[in-house]
Image (cartoon, coloured by chain):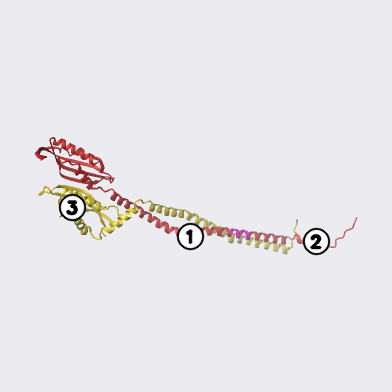
Chain colours: A yellow, B red
Amino acid sequence: MKLNLSKDQIQKTALAAMVAVGCLFYYFSEMIGPLAERETRAQKEMAALDPKIKKAKMQISRTQAVEKADPHAEEARRVLDAMRAKIPDMPPVAWFPTRLEAFLKQKGIAKPVFRAGTERKDPGIPGFEEASWSIELPQATFPVLGQALAALENQEGLLQITQLQIKPAAKEPDVHYAQITISTLVKRDK
Amino acid sequence: MAFHLNFYHEIHKQEERNRRDPVKLAWLGGLVLVICMALWYFYRLSEVSAVEARRNEVRRTWASLEPQGKDATGEEARLLALQKSNEELIARLHGRFYWAPFLEKLAAATPPFVQIVSLTGDLEAGRDKKQMVTVVVRGLSAGAQPRTAAEAYRRSLQESLGGIGTDISVVFDGNSLEDGAETVQFDGQALATASFRLRVQFTPKP
């Protein structure tokens, strides 16, 4: 079909085509283009955050699993509470000999001599350290000493006798001289 | 042949011109195109808005999870350290060696013809935290055959310690089993004596 367009019509058509091209450019560059950019940006951000979220969730669940997996937590908490209540907040030299002397006296063993060990070890229990004591018992008989040690071991759950020596007393053969070395937990110096 | 006159020919021509008017057609096409483009724009806008809403949700999740994750990392280290210290504490509590039962077994295994002069005991922990008890018992045995009596005592002591330890070794320390020079009175009889030094070693049962 042949179009017989007048000059005026040609001018209008050309103008319309130019406006259409301008509108199309505006449509794609200012409307559709920014939308695509926003979409891409959002997707990139999500792609970056997703692994972080997964990692954080894994970390949280792993921590919860570690918390639940401690088989000794309850017992250890009870023991630690008891220890904190039982061990005074003062240097062991101020309370340990007194307490043990009273205990031994109650069991019929008199005149114990206490010597604090110089070595202090870290037992791996926060807030506590291991102290050793050497105790001389110059007047003890074997049966009394045995019963006293049994009572001591039953009463003091975290005390360990590491060395034990029993021999006749030099002057009285019927009486025994004993020396025991004890390691026990005490509160760490602050 | 019939003669036909169309008095509306000008109107028809005008209608035909109007129908084929390219400007009008272009306007119509442009209008359809604009409508399509607007529809496409709103469709894309809704899609992008959905993606952004999802992104905002992810942002909110991350904002709440990030501090929790950081806390959990620190908490995990603290819990692991606590778990280790709990283990140490419980191992210390349950892995103790009780000397009183040992002394009780020793006293019970000692017959009247054996006298313990002294004993020295040591509790040592090896590198693997396995405990080892070493006790040196010095004593005297009396009887017609005092050395045989001392050997009988050694055996009975080894058997009696089965309840409290494993890997039990009860041996005379070096050449410590020797005949004594003096005699002792036992049940009205003068009996020869032998002195000995027994080395007792065992791993305590937990």
The span from disc 2 to disc 1 (Cα, nearest Å) is: 69 Å
- Determine the image quadrant of residue A25: bottom right
User: Is residue A188 a member of the stretch shown in magenta?
Assistant: no
Going from the N terminus, do you reach mark 2 or mark 1 first? 2
In the depicted view, which residue is nearer to us: A3 or A171? A171
The amino acid at mark 2 is Lys
Which amino acid lies under the numbered mark 1 shown in the image of this protein? Arg
Q: Position of residue B195 (x, y in %)?
A: 13, 39
Range drawn in magenta: B38-45
Of residues A101 and B85, which is closer to you in this image?
A: A101
**Residue topped by disc 3:** A135
Residue B58 position, x and y percent, is: 49, 58
Q: Residue at x 21, y 40 (%)?
A: B157
- Pair 2/1: label in front: 1
Which residue is disc 1 drawn over?
B60
Judging from the image, mark 2 belongs to the subunit labelled: B
- Quadrant of image for the C terminus of chain A: bottom left
Q: Which residue is mark 2?
A: B13
| Chain for disc number 3 | A
Tell which subunit mark 1 falls on.
B
Residue at the extreme front: B188
Q: Main secondary structure of the magenta part?
A: helix
**Residue B39 drawn in magenta:** yes
Does residue B153 lie above or below B69 as drawn?
Answer: above
What type is the residue that disc 3 sits on?
Ile
- For the residues beneath circles 3 and 1, the answer to whether they share a chain is no
Residue drawn at (54%, 57%) of the image: B51
